[in-house]
Amino acid sequence: MNRIDMEVSGGCQCGAVRYHATEMHDNAHLCHCRMCQKAVGNIFAALVAAPDDAIAWTRGQPAVWRSSEHVERGFCANCGTPLFYHDVHNGRTNFTIGSLDTPGAFPPGGHTGTEGKMPWFETITAIEDGGATEAGHEAWAAAIRASNHQHPDRDTDAWSPTPRQR
């Protein structure tokens, strides 16, 4: 795994927690293990690492849950966005690729935890493409955009996240 001089930023959906890294690793991957599935609420976790010494939390702090003796998982306590997987022994933090402002810059190059891979995973690229979010649902999509509380995919000087609702 190589270190790459590359600055990235990212954060949670509501904007309460933001981070910045001045270096990244070239280890973008999909982890299919059951712990990662549960942590991100999906069939895999898409992850890419930054060296711990290259990371700064620029707004707020993540909540952390220790999922094993070796692993901490970080998330936003306000909106619940999964932010990272951190092995406490290896000096790097694997950010969820979806929490990055530029997730397209990190195409996965491998799979780990394949014992948990869904038996139908290889078939998902053949599923019918339903098109853009708005296709056939223009009024619904317009209402969502009009009331959107999501933080933009960039750093902002100020942002007031909507408090948790329930």
Image (cartoon, helix red, strand yellow):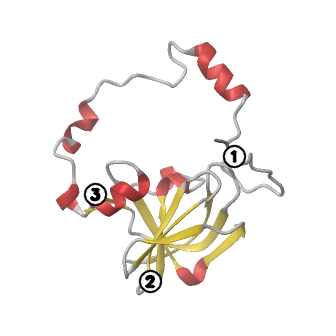
Amino acid type of the residue that numbered disc 2 sits on in the rendered structure: Val
Amino acid type of the residue that numbered disc 3 sits on in the rendered structure: His
How packed is label 2: few (under 14 Cα within 10 Å), some, or many (20 or more)?
few
Circle 2 sits on which residue? Answer: 88
Label 3 residue SS: loop
Residue 32 image label? 3
Spot occupied by residue 159 in the image (x, y as percentages of width and height): 80, 52
Q: Is residue 78 left or right of residue 129?
A: right
Circle 1 sits on which residue? Answer: 152
How packed is label 1: few (under 14 Cα within 10 Å), some, or many (20 or more)?
some
Q: CA distance from mark 3 to mark 1?
A: 28 Å
Label 2 residue SS: loop
How packed is label 3: few (under 14 Cα within 10 Å), some, or many (20 or more)?
many
Q: Nearer the viewer, mark 2 or mark 1?
A: 2
Quarter of the figure that contains the C terminus: top right
Which is more toward the observer, 133 or 36? Answer: 36
Q: Is residue 43 left or right of residue 95?
A: left
Q: Residue at x 17, y 60 (%)?
A: 115
